[in-house]
Image: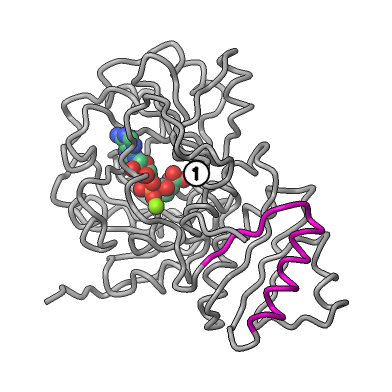
């Protein structure tokens, strides 16, 4: 039924991509194929954004609903301006400050952008990535590249080529292996097509940093903190964002967020382990709490330290790979300690609450 492809894998130097490798990947893009490549956030699955047929291969490979639009990756401001109907002053300000980097802007699209990319919406998502491999590929391909995260639809995003291979072997033409990604969570998505900017997805650029540049408060799309702040039912009158309708970031095991002070979180996890002796439990902890479990003689099936609470960047960087590792270890339930929603902590808690579908302990 399914068209299996031969998936080639090419190693590439992440800092100084070899031109022969980039040329080979650009050839695939030019003939309408699919290439998974590293960005500074997560791996993307790219195709020529101006070729509707090539773009449709992305949806097939991921099993992605066609109603979920794709981000278009560019390698210059001029290339971005050619894809929008209107370039507002806020876009100029933010682009000058954060591009290239992990920020995606939603803007009114130009007619050159195919419906397949925007899922028929009047807006296009633009991202100017900071990764040398992504930039070299866009330049050599001579076209903007549409790219969602390179995972099967619903799975955690890939932060290394092994994750891509696990999900998409036989479904894409080429994987460029440029090592692990730096940020580990996807870009921040800011919608500039509305009367006032709305943060649709927190990510590599913090809400605080955006507000400092725009000199105004940025409204959070209501689903962002679902289950984290208790504000999930709040009516804000903001129209829905396409991506939030779909299940996301979910490993096979059931994910449960553990709330409270760090001490309370450790106690809850210890109690859970004691009360569920037959369940294979994975625990994703922090440096501050990790020794607690050993001290109490608790032995979860898999214990992984994401990083220090003082460095939420570290926790962000390891989260997706830790969720995938728990699946490899065959655990039934993953208990994850929660962190405050400041800075990139907001992005961490957003991904976690969606992976957990709001299950909390
Ligand atoms: O860091 C990232 O953004 C990564 C790397 C590969 O660039 N890409 C990524 O793409 O995370 P994806 O497809 O996994 O997530 C993009 C999100 C989806 O939730 C989608 O619904 C939303 O962006 N999106 C895309 N185009 C949109 C549009 N025109 N309006 C509103 N939301 C849009
Ligand atoms: Mg994705």
Q: How is the image coloured?
A: one colour
| Position of the C terminus by quadrant | bottom right
Is residue 183 shown left or right of residue 156? right
Task: Answer whether residue 338 is magenta in the image.
Answer: no
Q: Residue at x 42, y 16 (%)?
A: 196
Is residue 348 shown left or right of residue 104? right
Q: Residue 146 location in percent, x, y?
A: 30, 44
Q: Mark 1 points at which residue?
A: 226
- Count of marks, rendered view: 1
Q: Is mark 1 within 8 Å of ligand 1?
A: no
Q: Residue at x 27, y 58 (%)?
A: 34
Is the magenta region chiefly helix, strand or loop?
A: helix
Q: Residue furthest bottom?
A: 278
In the displayed structure, 279 sits above or below 141; it is below
Is residue 294 shown left or right of residue 260? right
Q: Residue at x 38, y 64 (%)?
A: 175
User: Dot 1 surroundings within 10 Å: few (below 14), some, or many (20 or more)?
Assistant: some
Indicate the quadrant where residue 319 lies.
bottom right
Q: Residue 280 location in percent, x, y?
A: 59, 83
Q: Residue 70 location in percent, x, y?
A: 30, 43
Q: Where does the magenta region start and end?
A: 255-276
Indicate the quadrant where residue 212 lies.
top right
Q: Nearer the viewer, residue 90 or 220?
A: 220
| Position of the N terminus by quadrant | bottom left
Task: Answer whether residue 263 is magenta in the image.
Answer: yes
């Amino acid at each position: 039924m399914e068209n299996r492809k031969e998936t080639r894998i090419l190693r590439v130097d992440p800092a100084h991509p070899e031109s022969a490798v980039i040329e080979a990947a650009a050839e695939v893009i030019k003939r309408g194929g699919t290439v998974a490549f590293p960005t500074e956030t997560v791996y993307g699955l790219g195709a020529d954004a101006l070729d509707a047929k090539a773009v449709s291969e992305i949806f097939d490979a991921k099993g992605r609903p066609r109603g979920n639009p794709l981000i278009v990756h560019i390698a210059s401001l001029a290339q971005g301006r050619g894809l929008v109907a209107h370039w507002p002053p806020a876009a100029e300000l933010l682009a000058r400050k954060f591009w290239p980097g992990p920020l995606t802007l939603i803007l009114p699209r130009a007619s050159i952008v195919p419906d397949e990319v925007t899922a028929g919406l009047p807006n296009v998502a633009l991202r100017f990535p900071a990764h040398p491999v992504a930039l070299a590929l866009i330049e050599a391909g001579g076209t903007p590249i549409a790219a969602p995260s390179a995972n099967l639809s619903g799975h955690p995003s890939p932060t290394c080529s092994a994750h891509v291979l696990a999900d998409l072997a036989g479904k894409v033409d080429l994987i460029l292996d440029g090592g692990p990604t730096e940020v580990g969570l996807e870009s921040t998505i800011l919608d500039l097509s509305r009367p006032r900017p709305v943060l649709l997805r927190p990510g590599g650029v913090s809400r605080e940093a955006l507000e400092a540049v725009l000199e105004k408060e940025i409204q959070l799309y209501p689903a962002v903190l679902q289950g984290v702040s208790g504000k999930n039912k709040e009516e804000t009158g903001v129209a829905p964002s396409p991506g939030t309708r779909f299940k996301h970031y979910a490993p096979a095991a059931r994910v449960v967020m553990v709330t409270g002070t760090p001490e309370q979180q450790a106690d809850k996890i210890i109690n859970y382990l004691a009360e569920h002796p037959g369940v294979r439990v994975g625990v994703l902890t922090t440096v501050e709490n990790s020794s607690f479990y050993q001290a109490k003689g608790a032995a979860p099936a898999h214990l992984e330290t994401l990083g220090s609470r003082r460095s939420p960047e570290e926790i962000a960087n390891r989260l997706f790979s830790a969720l995938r590792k728990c699946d490899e270890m065959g655990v039934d339930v993953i208990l994850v300690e929660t962190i405050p929603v400041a800075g990139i902590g907001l992005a961490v808690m957003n991904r976690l609450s969606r992976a957990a579908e709001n299950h909390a302990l």
